[in-house]
Image (spheres, rainbow, N blue to C red):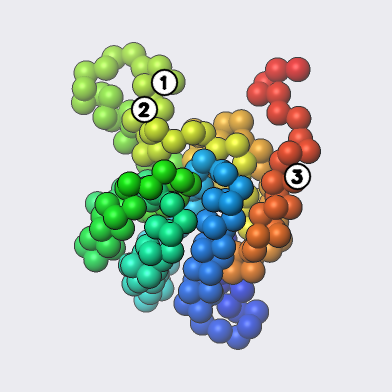
Amino acid sequence: MDGNGRWAKARGLPRAAGHKAGVDSVREAVRSCGELGIEALTLYSFSTENWLRPKEEVDTLMDLLAWALKEETPELDKNNVRLRASGRLQGLPESVRAQLDESMAFLDKNTGLVLNLALNYGSRAEIVDAVNGLLRDGVKEVSEEEISGRLYTAGLPDPDLLIRTSGEMRISNFLLWQIAYAELVVTQTNWPDFRKTHLHEAIAQFQGRSRRFGGL
């Protein structure tokens, strides 16, 4: 979900306005994925590196996150969406953790799209945490399956498609283990402008590719 700040700057607005506008894009993306029968959608909502931003912006993001979770939970429930979160969640403010727990519990009965929010997430940290968990359990030799089972995303399918908005050509420490064979689509569209048509265009690109998973 990249490009909120650039979207706001282009309109002479504070960065916070871009982040808030991005909530509309989240709502549309979630609804569209549900309509398409997609099993899971992971949104890179706040990274471990995002704490390096100015405190005022971080505080605004946390307040917006708690507000959006509360406001959007009824809509998510209406669309049969189940909510998960991946990351070092204990590092989030108490207000965010409390609302996250409340929303996840409320939506746990649902059976449709799984919306996975990557919060205080960094893929290197995720892999380190997975390995340390195995070491604490006395495991001396690990397999790919054991590491996958200790990741924050355990139980979710590996992504088939990674969409990067705002034209940035990098992964930014996101799902490094899980996207080993994902198809990448980069769009110049900033996240607040990302709509159903952009999602469909990305999926059309994905469907037009031949996935060989290292084979012929």
Q: Residue at the location (67% across, 21% down)?
A: 214
Q: Earlier in the sequence, mark 3 or mark 1?
A: 1
Q: Position of residue 26 (x, y in %)?
A: 52, 62
| Residues tagged 2 and 3 counted as in contact (Cβ below 8 A) | no
- Left or right of 93: which side holds 193? right
Q: Residues within 10 Å of mark 1 (few under 14, many from 20)?
A: few
Q: Amino acid at mark 1?
A: Glu
Q: Please state the horizontal and vertical placement of residue 210, each as a whole percent of the image.
A: 76, 30
Against 52, residue 38 (above or below) is: above
Q: Mark 1 sits on what residue? A: 145
Secondary structure at numbered mark 1: helix
Residue 211 placement (x, y as % from top left): 71, 28
Rounded to the nearest angstrom, the CA distance separating label 2 from label 3 is 30 Å
Q: Is residue 62 left or right of residue 209?
A: left
* Left or right: 21 as drawn, with respect to 153: right
Question: Hey, what amino acid is under mark 3?
Answer: Gln
Q: Residue at x 41, y 21 (%)?
A: 145
**Earlier residue among tags 2 and 3:** 2
Report if residue 97 is visible in the image: no
Q: Residue furthest bottom?
A: 12
Q: Name the residue rendered at 41%, 43% in the picture.
A: 111
The quadrant the C terminus occupies is top right
Which label was assigned to residue 149?
2
For the residues labelled 2 and 1, say whether their Cβ atoms are less than 8 Å apart.
yes
The residue pinned by badge 3 equals 205
Is residue 14 shown to the viewer in this render? yes
Q: Is residue 213 above or below residue 41?
A: above
Tell me whether circle 3 and circle 1 mark residues in contact (CB < 8 Å).
no
Query: What residue is shown at x 59% (from left), y 69% (from top)?
Result: 192
